[in-house]
Amino acid sequence: TTIFDLQTTGATASTSLRRRLLDAIGDLTVQSSVVPDVRFAGAIDTLVPARIHAHAEAVLREALSNALRHAQAKTVDIAVTADSNLTLVISDDGVGISDSGRRSGLENMSRRAQQCGGTCTITSATSGASGTTTPGASGTGTLGASGTGTLGASGTGTLGASGTVVTWVVPLP
């Protein structure tokens, strides 16, 4: 990523999804004590069509902003993979999603996935909560309080007794 930062300038910077995502992370974390661990895999700048770039950036901004502003997270992991799908996984060790509060940002991430023919799964472990409502493929769904499990193929780690994992997957042509 550091070498990529040094090599991306001019016209390449304006068309590079990797650059857009790194810039978004930089914008959101400039005054934060939390520095996300960011991993890229696959030919992101060649496999992902430009029509998906704005959606991916908006989803990353929403998920990261939630982790930094609301979750009281100490660590945030971001994994971006391009193969037959573009997959963004943003996970944190924060307090999870509360039962109350606005859901517009969560619904927007799901809506953007649907517009691109994909899915958005939000898994949250909330301490002492009976459940958290979160968007699913139809726009709404229910998440149980335990919310524990492994992230699987994305390789970003494990969600334990607290935290949130946003997994945004859209198929690539």
Image: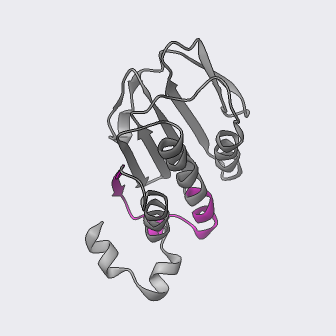
Tell me: 73 left or right of 168: left
Determine the image quadrant of residue 43.
bottom left
- Seen at 50% across and 51% down, the residue is 85
- Image spot of residue 158 (x, y percent): 34, 30
Determine the image quadrant of residue 56.
bottom right
- Image spot of residue 117 (x, y percent): 66, 48
- Seen at 52% across and 77% down, the residue is 15
Asked whether 124 or 115 is in front, the reply is 124
Q: Residue furthest bottom?
A: 10
- Seen at 32% across and 81% down, the residue is 7
Q: Which colour scheme is used?
A: one colour
Residue 171 visible to an observer of this rendering: no
- Image spot of residue 145 (x, y percent): 53, 15
Asked whether 26 or 39 is in front, the reply is 26
* Magenta span of residues: 34-56
Let me know if residue 35 is in the magenta part.
yes
Q: In which quarter of the image is the C terminus?
A: bottom right
Let me know if residue 119 is in the magenta part.
no
Residue 30 visible to an observer of this rendering: yes
Asked whether 50 or 95 is in front, the reply is 95
- Seen at 53% across and 39% down, the residue is 70
Tell me: 78 left or right of 169: left
- Rendered position, 171 above or below 162: below
- Rendered position, 137 above or below 20: above
